[in-house]
Image (cartoon, rainbow, N blue to C red):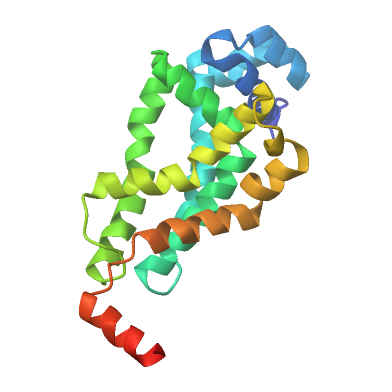
Amino acid sequence: MARPSQGIDEALLRSGRELFAASGCDRLSLRVLAEHAGVNVGMFHYHFKSKDNFLRTLLQQMYEEGFALLSLEAAQPGQALERLRLALRALGRFLREHRPFVSRVWSDAAMGQSVAREFVRANAPRHLGLLLGLMAQAEADGDLRAMPPLQRFVFVMGAVAAPMFIAPVVADIGIAGTLSGHALGAQVLSDAAIDTRVDMALDALRPPVAPERRVRKGARHA
């Protein structure tokens, strides 16, 4: 027979997702969380024992969803470059959908919050390793230029991920009118905008064309 409290843990985690971005780890109130989920605080302690355990579960649950999307695209058939392209597109969409949550995790970690720092240290190597591995394979295939792996990774993340966090803040502050409303969605946050930035970043990392090849190509069009 199912225990009477079945489903309460999921309800608390759903509420945690909604409340976390505004509160962060330290300011998340168990009373407010329980009220939001429609349960009593005693049931929170029954399921999670402590606030830190709840936060670990909440952060890990969110991460596993994103990593599953990334891994699915990385495992598609085809050359490493195309699998990298698909993985980066999936990453961009995930960050768009969960930007406030992700921003809060990184902010808490940067401020030294112990659960957030523990979470980032444990999980960042997973997606970093997956993407770096695809980039290294694409380089070995001759589809990306040879360069220091972290330099390449930071360049790509600057094109794919950074606009998700920077552009909305700029629009909120009100210092760039063209990044408000429809324009922000169409030019920065839409699927098409994400795909365009991914393609531009990967095109910029293509191996340079040999001078003699450029000359022959130009001669054919003369």
**Residue at coordinates 21% horizontally, 60% vertically from top-left?**
146
**Residue at coordinates 38% horizontally, 13% vertically from top-left?**
112
State the count of labels: 0
**Residue at coordinates 48% horizontally, 33% vertically from top-left?**
60
Q: Is residue 31 left or right of residue 118?
A: right
* Quarter of the rendering containing residue 41: top right
Q: Is residue 73 visible?
A: no
Compare residues 94 and 181 and report the one nearer the observer. 181
Q: Is residue 14 visible?
A: yes
Q: Is residue 192 left or right of residue 218?
A: right
Q: Is residue 198 left or right of residue 168?
A: left
Residue 171 point in image, percent of width and height: 67, 30
Residue 128 point in image, percent of width and height: 34, 44
**Residue at coordinates 26% horizontally, 71% vertically from top-left?**
142
Q: Is residue 115 left or right of residue 24?
A: left
Q: Is residue 201 above or below residue 178?
A: below
Compare residues 198 and 16 and report the one nearer the observer. 198
Residue 56 point in image, percent of width and height: 48, 25
Q: Is residue 3 above or below residue 132?
A: above
Figure quadrant of the C terminus: bottom left
Figure quadrant of the N terminus: top right
